[in-house]
Image (cartoon, rainbow, N blue to C red):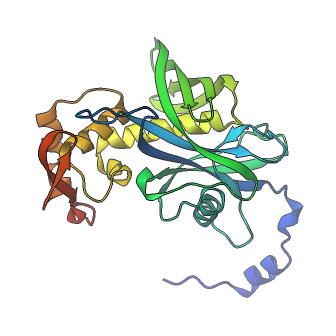
Amino acid sequence: MHYEMSAEEKQYLANYDIRNFPQPSVTADIAVFAVREQEEEREYRRDPSLALSILLIRRGNYPYKDCWALPGGFLRPGESAEESALRELEEETSIINAYLRPFGIFSETDRDPRGWIISHGFLALVDAGDYQVRAGTDAWDARWFSLHVEAADREKQVNGTRAQIRCRYKMVLENKEQNALLQAEIEEIRQFEQHHETVSYKILEDDGFAFDHARILLQAFLELQRQTEQEGKIVFDLMPERFTLNMLQDVTEIILGKKLLTPNFRRKMQPLVTETDETLTGSGHRPARLFKRNLEAYYQ
């Protein structure tokens, strides 16, 4: 049934002034992940060492001038948060057509020294080989950083239907080319009340990040891990169009931070991939069959 406004409702809206209410500014911040070769010399007959990487920009303007931040910016009039994220990503890094999905809203009143600014967090995945990133607009540098996240400490308290789980995460980001090292320690607090869960985060240490972007990055990483553990489909957006099963397992293990049993992994991935007639040669190995994602598994 199509809704039609009454004359009274139209009159109400004609006299309604949204400026009577406080108006926050809205931004989109994008955590762009890729799996890239480590910045080290590659030896013959040895596969390159891979690392999960995050794309950061160095801010060219105040506040936090010269600090590293996630790509992003303010929504323009008539623009959705998703449209803003895609535009800002292209303007600040030259990346287009990235896998993009929202993962969080960041609305603390003190998160930005410029005022009341609410941010939509987006998770983006790319095959790093497809892009030569460049900086633009208010970013004067754009670089890939290797990312290492470690759950450093965990504390659990239970009292009937109430419970609290605290977990500290340590993040280390490094770009050897720029001799840049960023570090942060963030506490995740999960509280349970009558079986209902709420989650909050607190930045304990923050070295080199702009705004609250260390926290946003951690939440994006944890979401990437969750999606990888649950289904595995998300990993394909970090892969080239053609890949070996060993490559797919390597990338999955890098995200999860643990080794997987190959038979179990291949059994889980079997419905999601399609074998091709192509093989990969080189690096001193026997030719390996190349696969591609099975699109039918995505169209359900």
Please say whether residue 127 is visible from this viewpoint.
no
Q: Quadrant of the C terminus?
A: bottom left
Please say whether residue 11 is visible from this viewpoint.
yes
User: Where 9 sits versus 109, above or below?
Assistant: below
Name the residue located 26 percent from the left edge and 32 percent from the top edge: 46
Which residue is at the front of the view, 51 or 12? 51
User: Where 261 sits versus 102, above or below?
Assistant: above
Residue situated furthest front in the rendering: 44
Name the residue located 54 percent from the left edge and 21 percent from the top edge: 170
Which residue is at the front of the view, 288 or 239? 288
Q: Position of residue 52 (x, y in %)?
A: 43, 37
Q: Is 194 positioned to the left or the right of 85 in the image?
A: left
User: Where 10 sits versus 28, above or below?
Assistant: below
In the picture, residue 259 is in which quadrant? top left
Q: Position of residue 85 (x, y in %)?
A: 60, 59
Which residue is at the front of the view, 191 or 10? 191
In the picture, residue 87 is in which quadrant? bottom right
Q: Position of residue 195 (x, y in %)?
A: 44, 29
Name the residue located 65 percent from the left edge and 60 percent from the top edge: 88
Which residue is at the front of the view, 161 or 122? 122
Residue situated furthest right in the rendering: 20
Q: Position of residue 70 (x, y in %)?
A: 63, 45
Tell how many labels. Answer: 0
Q: Is 117 positioned to the left or the right of 266 in the image?
A: right
Q: Is 212 positioned to the left or the right of 50 in the image?
A: right
